[in-house]
């Protein structure tokens, strides 16, 4: 398949591109930074902002599927990256007749999500990190989900938990709406998207993704994902 990947130069995007190429897909990697990704057999690079209609239109044309792994750091200011890019991408897909869309959101978008047995996370980390420091980010993720749900595309909202780095794909778990777990390895997130792109088990619904085989260092995770990115 020919797939267009938005956010291809991000930490999840790089894993997604490599896994897609390794499994024989043709990839158009979309990045805002010229020279940050080098083209090679099977990989074309499109320089575009995901909110720019012209650049997005050119990147989407000819694709069989679009995968969005866009991300942005926490901010006290209003965030619009997710919802604005969702409008631009879905409009371009409609113009080109591209139906399959997978977009990364978060398990936090499910208002009922509370991981079983994760008392420290549920009582301390979630209220402090996700509901406070990440409030504006997750508000825009919910707006993004609303934009996508209103389309007639074959969409899947991909909802990981706390993202962390792990070198290999593990025996990850997926579930409809959200998944019962605290962490998701980026390698597993990328693998789950590629699998769902073909299997189509969660079309027009949300797919929660969690990693159960390994766990990250929590202090390092908070530093890398919530502090260092600033």
Image (cartoon, rainbow, N blue to C red):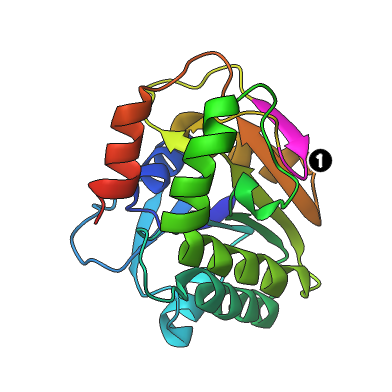
- The x, y position of residue 89, in whole percent, is 56, 74
**Residue 125 placed where, x, y %?**
47, 38
Q: Residue furthest top?
A: 213
In terms of depth relative to the viewer, which is nearer, 82 or 218? 218
Residue at coordinates 26% horizontally, 48% vertically from top-left?
227
Residue extending furthest toward the left: 35
Question: Which SS does the magenta portion mostly show?
Answer: strand
Task: Determine which quarter of the picture holds residue 36.
Answer: bottom left
> Residue at coordinates 68% horizontally, 40% vertically from top-left?
208
Whether residue 212 appears in magenta in the rendering, the answer is: no
Q: How crowded is the residue under tag 1: few (<14 C-alpha within 10 Å), some, or many (20+)? A: some
Give coordinates of residue 220: x percent, y percent: 29, 30
Tell me if residue 62 can be seen. no
Residue 121 position (above or below residue 99): above
185 relative to 61, above or below: above
Residue at 44%, 73% (x, y): give it.
Answer: 79
Residue at left 58%, top 41%?
Answer: 160
Residue sitting farthest toward the front? 123
Does the segment drawn in magenta span residue 177? Answer: yes
Which is nearer the eye, 214 or 87?
Answer: 214
| Quarter of the figure with residue 172 | top right
Q: Nearer the viewer, residue 147 or 224?
A: 224
For residue 29, side relative to residue 229 (left or right): right
Q: Quadrant of the C terminus?
A: bottom left
- Image: magenta residue range: 173-178
- Residue 102 appearing in the image: yes
Give percent across and percent down for residue 151: 77, 74
Q: Is residue 160 above or below residue 167?
A: below
Q: Tag 1's secondary structure?
A: loop
The residue that mark 1 highlights is 201
Q: Is residue 175 left or right of residue 118?
A: right
């Amino acid at each position: 398949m020919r797939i267009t990947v938005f956010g291809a130069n991000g930490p999840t995007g790089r894993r997604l591109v490599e896994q897609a190429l390794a499994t024989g897909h043709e990839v158009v990697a979309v990045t805002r930074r010229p020279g940050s990704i080098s083209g090679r057999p099977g990989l074309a690079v499109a320089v575009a902002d995901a909110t720019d209609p012209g650049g997005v239109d050119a990147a989407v044309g000819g694709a069989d599927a679009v995968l969005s792994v866009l991300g942005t750091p926490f901010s006290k200011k209003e965030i619009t990256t997710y919802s604005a890019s969702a409008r631009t991408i879905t409009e371009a897909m409609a113009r080109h007749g591209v139906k399959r869309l997978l977009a990364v959101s978060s398990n936090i978008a499910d208002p009922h999500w509370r991981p079983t047995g994760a008392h420290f996370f549920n009582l301390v980390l979630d209220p402090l990190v996700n509901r406070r420091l990440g409030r504006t980010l997750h508000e825009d993720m919910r707006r993004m989900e609303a934009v996508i749900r209103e389309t007639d595309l074959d969409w899947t909202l991909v909802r990981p938990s706390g993202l962390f780095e792990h070198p290999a794909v593990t025996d990850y778990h997926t579930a409809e709406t959200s998944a019962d777990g605290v962490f998701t390895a980026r390698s597993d997130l990328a693998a789950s998207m590629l699998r769902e792109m073909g299997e189509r088990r969660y079309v027009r619904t949300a797919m929660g993704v969690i990693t159960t085989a390994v766990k990250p260092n929590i202090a390092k995770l908070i530093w890398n994902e919530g502090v260092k990115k600033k």
